[in-house]
Image: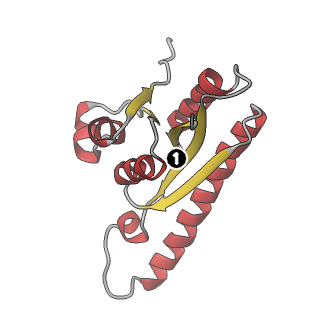
Amino acid sequence: MAQQVMVVGIDESEQSTYALNWTLDHFFVPVSTPLFKLVLAHAKPTPSTAVGLIGPGMADVLSVVEADLRKTAARVIEQAKELCSKKSVNEVIVEVVEGDARNVLCEVVEKHHASVLVVGSHGYGAIKRAVLGSVSDYCAHHAHCTVMIVKKPKTKH
């Protein structure tokens, strides 16, 4: 039987790091032969969406933004691979795809025929979620697999 695939969406947020850590601890570390093949997916925004406004003379700005987005993606991937390595999870496929996170995660799920997609929850309120759109909510409705939303526990004061 072919090994099932689990895709974990990663970005630079602490919620994403928590979700990856949680996933490694619950599905990969306690077992000698994991049930899943692990795919890490990072959506790199396009420079134009990151800047939001394109007009004459913007080429210089876009090249600076593109370089920054590449550095961010490299840092996110490096940190995620380090986390996997620390937990002795060395067989990891990494996908960096340019585009909106909602679409990218669903595309990676399709590409790898994943049976599970794991995303962290940013815990946005209703207004912020309505304006920004929730990646986890979108994926829960559109990804062709089980979607697991990992929430970081709130700290009590």
Task: Quadrant for residue 45, please give it.
Answer: bottom left
Task: Quadrant for residue 134, please give it.
Answer: top left
Q: Which residue is mark 1?
A: 11
Tell me: 36 left or right of 110: right
Amino acid at dot 1: Asp
Element type at mark 1: loop
Q: Nearer the viewer, residue 78 or 156?
A: 78
Q: Position of residue 113 (x, y in %)?
A: 45, 45
Residue found farthest to the front = 1
Q: Position of residue 94 (x, y in %)?
A: 60, 52
Residue found farthest to the bottom = 56
Question: Residue shown at 57%/71% (left/top)?
Answer: 67
For the residue carrying disc 1, how many other residues have a C-alpha within 10 Å: few (<14), some (14-19), or many (20+)? many
Question: Residue shown at 58%/58% (left/top)?
Answer: 72
Asked if residue 76 can be seen in this view, the reply is no
Q: Nearer the viewer, residue 21 or 142?
A: 142
Question: Residue shown at 52%/47% (left/top)?
Answer: 11
Asked if residue 111 can be seen in this view, the reply is yes
Q: Position of residue 142 (x, y in %)?
A: 28, 42
Task: Quadrant for residue 37, please give it.
Answer: top right
Q: Nearer the viewer, residue 48 or 9?
A: 9
Q: Position of residue 29 (x, y in %)?
A: 70, 25
Q: In this picture, is 56 found above or below 139?
A: below
